[in-house]
């Protein structure tokens, strides 16, 4: 079972690493998103965004190594669960905000159910956290993890196209 989860651990590491890099590249936008999600001032949003990037990058690295995979997966599940809770809270308050959850500049407006992605990612790494890793990543694991990540990015783009088409038609 542990061997089957290695590609998913790599996939989660890629998502976390990309999210951390995204927070660095688009620091102002994502600091604003963090401030909006938490209801804190922009100065706190900057600190939250930098802190999240640090946790995401260190967790991404730790997911690659079998000795730290369970703890890292637990940290990732906690991070994505917290993010989902903040997104649900914002939606219940009726806020329309940039969740910062997409790499695309095309769909900065409200995504349909943005918390579903966070819940799905948290559930996936939650399963990885439950199973001890016995071996490191093999070459097939790396290819599989990259393939899953590619499908994830493609799905993100398909959602963006759908959201844009609805705005143009409406």
Image (cartoon, rainbow, N blue to C red):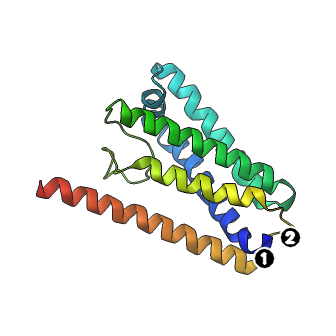
Residue 9 percent coordinates (x, y): 70, 63
* Quarter-of-image position of residue 4: bottom right
Residue displayed at 42% across by 66% down: 155
Q: Residue furthest left?
A: 170
**Image-based side of 56 in relation to 115, left or right:** right
Instruction: Sort mark 1 into few (<14), some (14-19) or many (20+) by Cα contacts within 10 Å.
Output: few
Q: Is residue 34 above or below residue 126?
A: above
Q: Are marks 2 and 1 in contact (CB under 8 Å)?
A: yes
Q: Which mark is residue 25?
A: none
Q: Secondary structure at mark 1?
A: loop
Q: Is residue 126 above or below residue 144?
A: above
Q: Secondary structure at mark 2?
A: loop
How many dots with numbers? 2
Reading the image, the residue beneath label 2 is 135
Reading the image, the residue beneath label 1 is 138
Residue displayed at 60% across by 33% down: 50
Residue displayed at 47% across by 64% down: 153
Q: Is residue 167 above or below residue 83?
A: below
Instruction: Sort mark 2 into few (<14), some (14-19) or many (20+) by Cα contacts within 10 Å.
Output: few
Residue displayed at 51% across by 26% down: 45
Label 2 to label 1: alpha-carbon separation:
8 Å
* Quarter-of-image position of residue 97: top left
Report the mark closest to the observer, 2 or 1.
2
**Image-based side of 129 in relation to 87, left or right:** right
- Tell me the quarter of the image containing the N terminus: bottom right
Residue 43 percent coordinates (x, y): 51, 20
Taking depth in this image into account, of 36 and 53 the one nearest to the observer is 36
């Amino acid at each position: 079972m542990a061997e089957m989860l290695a590609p998913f651990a790599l996939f989660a590491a890629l998502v976390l690493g990309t999210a951390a890099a995204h927070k660095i590249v688009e620091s102002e936008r994502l600091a604003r998103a963090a401030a909006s999600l938490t209801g804190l001032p922009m100065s706190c949003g900057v600190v939250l965004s930098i802190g999240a990037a640090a946790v995401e990058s260190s967790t991404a690295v730790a997911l690659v190594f079998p000795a730290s995979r369970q703890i890292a997966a637990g940290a990732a599940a906690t991070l994505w669960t917290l993010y989902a809770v903040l997104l649900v809270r914002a939606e219940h308050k009726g806020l329309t905000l940039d969740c910062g959850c997409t790499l695309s500049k095309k769909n900065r407006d409200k995504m349909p159910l943005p918390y579903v992605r966070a819940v799905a990612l948290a559930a996936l790494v939650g399963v990885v956290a439950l199973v001890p890793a016995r071996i490191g990543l093999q070459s097939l694991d790396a290819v599989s993890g990259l393939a899953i990540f590619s499908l994830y990015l493609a799905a993100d783009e398909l959602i963006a196209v759908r959201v844009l088409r609805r705005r143009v038609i409406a």
